[in-house]
Image (tube, grey):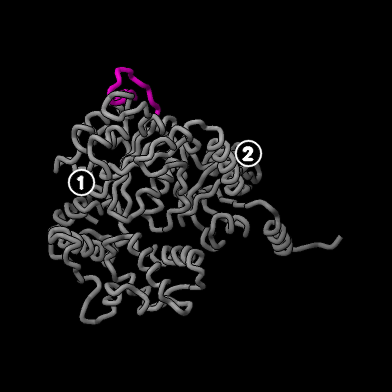
Amino acid sequence: MPNHSQTEVDTYLELVLNHIAEAVQVVNFEGITIYYNKLAAEMDDFQVSDVLGKHIMQVYPSLTLETSSFMTVLKTGKPLLDLQQTIVTSTGKIVNIICSTFPLYRNGVLVGACDISQDITKIKELSDRVINLHSELLDTRIRERQKIKLVAPEGLARYTFNDLIGSHDSMIKLKILGQRIAVNSSSVLVAGETGTGKELVVQSIHNASARKNEPFVAQNCAAFPVTLLESILFGTVKGSFTGAEDRPGLFELAHGGTLFLDEINSMPMELQSKLLRVLQDGTLRRIGDNKVRQVDTRIITCMNMNPEDAVRNKELRIDLYYRLNVVSLTVPPLRERKSDIPALANYFISMYNRKLCCRVSGISEEVKQTFYKHLWPGNVRELQHAIEHAMNIISGQIIELEHLPSHLRQKNDPKISGDNQVILGEHSLPEILNNVEKRCLNQAMEQCKNNISKTAILLGIPRQTLQYKLKMYDLSSNYSMPKNRQGIMGAE
């Protein structure tokens, strides 16, 4: 028998592992990845070099010491077999897998762990679709919902967390937190500026929950006057007012599922008190009815302003705020995650290529820089409209500056700085000043590599003032800062 060197054996072994139908990943005793085959990279949407040498918790930030099969096996020394997991990678991709993780021993000493997994994301999606179709066909409530003609048609939510485009840290954190809260039925309050994609987040929560096969009903609270909105939400009984019929409200139609109330701060105060009663005990009365009805409906609400500001402005009852704000999510504005702009632009280009029968392949470098300079007051929706505008007038395959809307073309004028341009009428002076100050704080912290003392010196303000402003603008979570002995955000 010919003798083979260890190098030859390793080469043959790597060839074999790169051609099997399973994803293979090996970590050492510290949890650092030392082997990662090509199928694993394709499944997670990584390059092999992106993962080698990194800790497993860094690659998959959605996992914890308790939920990571690798960390559990390294702790117990025992294998975990056929474990189904949903993971979020550091690029924001959500993957459903079935995996088996084995401890690796050398001379009786635990030296690492090996994971062999299969991607079941597409299989799970197909299974969910079949279940959804059966639910739609068999659920008699569909016919009941069709009787209501005053509200926009509702049905099953379309979007999942994988439809939230972006790999910025803030988006990854949003997806991870959204996945975690989806498994419960607690009320959720989603806040974010107009155009950030709050409804996509809401639908994603519904689709990641155990209620995904039940109704998803959406209602904008600013769309109807108080009397009409009350009957829409709670239902009516025949004779309660002229022309009234026995009709269920949205709470009943969403029974077992999710009721999404958009612009909740636009709901009149007297109606907010009735909503509070439903949230507290899960019961309601139709208008004109003496009968109390029990409902099992998860409530998710949205608003395009700071919830605490809505309470201070008496737009939202404080007791309702605390009831709704069991779990809160904030969708970041586009200006705070500009690194996601290329991916978003490519997504919208692909979408409008299909809709408009175009063959656009991308944006020019000049357009990319213009996008980076713009403040995006309309957020992702404004970017979408800019791409749609360009693709309606383009004749080539690359979107150039001349194809953009006029307010974006001005960004190329050297007399107008994109970071300093103010579009009057879209923002009040306090909002403009706050945005400028917030941007300056971000830029200074990045320039000083998140060093509090150096940043304070650069800005010419006391360190305590800088800490206060970072907390005021909710920027402190973006930077890792130690605590001093008094527990206050620290020096370096």
Q: Which residue is mark 1?
A: 488
Question: Residue 133 has which mark?
Answer: none
Magenta-drawn stretch contains 285: yes
Mark 1 vs mark 2: in front: 2
Residue 446 pos. (x, y %): 28, 64
Residue 68 pos. (x, y %): 51, 42
Mark 2 lies on a secondary structure that is strand
Q: Is residue 295 above or below residue 470?
A: above
Q: Is residue 74 above or below residue 241?
A: below
Disc 1 to disc 2, how far (Cα)?
45 Å
Residue at x 31%, y 48% (from the top left corner): 330
Residue at x 52%, y 53% (from the top left corner): 32
Residue 486 pos. (x, y %): 19, 43
Task: Please state, as top left, top right, bottom left or bottom right, where the C terminus lies in the image.
Answer: bottom left
Taking depth in this image into account, of 70 and 338 the one nearest to the observer is 338
Q: Is residue 99 left or right of residue 225?
A: right
Taking depth in this image into account, of 417 and 456 the one nearest to the observer is 417
Q: Is residue 312 above or below residue 363?
A: above
Q: Which residue is mark 2?
A: 82
Taking depth in this image into account, of 380 and 132 the one nearest to the observer is 132
Residue at x 25%, y 54% (from the top left corner): 475
Residues drawn in magenta = 280-296
Residue at x 20%, y 37% (from the top left corner): 268
